[in-house]
Image (cartoon, helix red, strand yellow):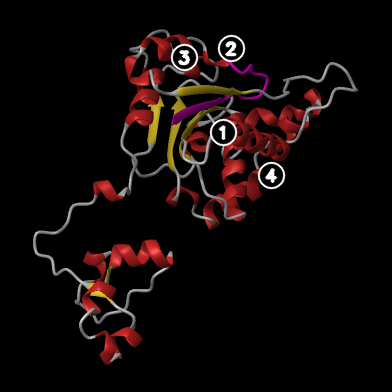
Amino acid sequence: MNTIIFVHGLGGKPEKTWGKFTQLLTADDFFKDFKIEYYPYTTSLIKFFPWSIFPKIQHLADGLRTFINNRTTFDDKITIVTHSMGGLIARKYLVEEIKNKNKLKVKKILLFATPNKGSQLAKLSCLSRITQVGQMKKGSDFINELHNDWKSLNVEKYIQVKYVVGGKDRVVDGDSAKYFGNFGDVEVISFGNHRNIVKPKDENDDSFLIFKKFVLQRLKFLVEDYEKPQIYIPRKIINVKDYDDSSFFYIKEKLQLTLFEAILKFNKVVLLAGAGEGKTREL
């Protein structure tokens, strides 16, 4: 099943943050077979009571893992849609999933106004006394570690990512919101500020159109997208022992595998050949 999980930001609410998104999704036939979920967690802009506890972003990422595992199946295809700090929670979750070599059920992530390089306003954390705010400071240990992990693990090799920037956002500047988005995976909503960028007025609002196009577009790098070259030499492989065994002479053809079958069977394949013999085209 296709599942969309919304993750709100600092001081936000699971559904209220997203304005008319729920209403627009319900009214759109394209999403009639999608399951919609909202990840709830404790957050606030200001700590009013000294005994209040607000989990670190790392713990919220662990909670997102539990939330996903309990509400989706092994074969579900998940799109995570985030706002502000919610993007950091989702990114931390994905980093840890890859580190732990878990199968990724999340196929896409849409980041609205996420402070990927930190927020200039988070320097006021001394006033709010909220740990989550302090973690979002530019140059904080959390931001630096997440940046290094995301880059070294090459997360965008496994997940399709879209960054959305608000042209009037005073909380998260464009450089922080677009992050690594230098290859056509950045959208800018000129009149979007940090709050209304995720509150579409109707189905023609840019925020909803960006969301809809991203969720419904075909995933990149799928086998079904592959077009075989017009000039192509079909190749098969066979275990060298079977090839040399004369007793297999009449059934050698049955023992052969295509390269695609070999990848499915052995999981990892090293393809060796001389220069110009078609390795790249075959791959």
Q: Amino acid at mark 2?
A: Lys
Local crowd size for mark 2, using a 10 Å CA cut-off: few (<14), some (14–19), many (≥20)? few
Circle 4 residue? 142
The local secondary structure at tag 2 comes to helix
First-in-chain label (2 vs 1) = 2
Element type at mark 1: helix
Whether the magenta-drawn stretch holds residue 10 is answered as: yes
Magenta segment, which residues? 1-15
Q: Which residue is mark 2?
A: 16
- Does residue 170 appear anywhere in the picture? no
Quarter of the image where one finds residue 160: top left
Closer mark to the observer between disc 1 and disc 4: 1
Q: Quadrant of the C terminus?
A: bottom left
Q: Residue furthest left?
A: 231
The alpha-carbon separation of the residues under discs 2 and 1 comes to 17 Å
Residue matched to label 3: 21
* Main secondary-structure element of the magenta-colored stretch: loop
Asked if marks 4 and 3 touch (Cβ < 8 Å), the reply is no
User: Which residue in the structure is indicated by mark 1?
Assistant: 87
x and y, in percent, of residue 84 in the image:
58, 28
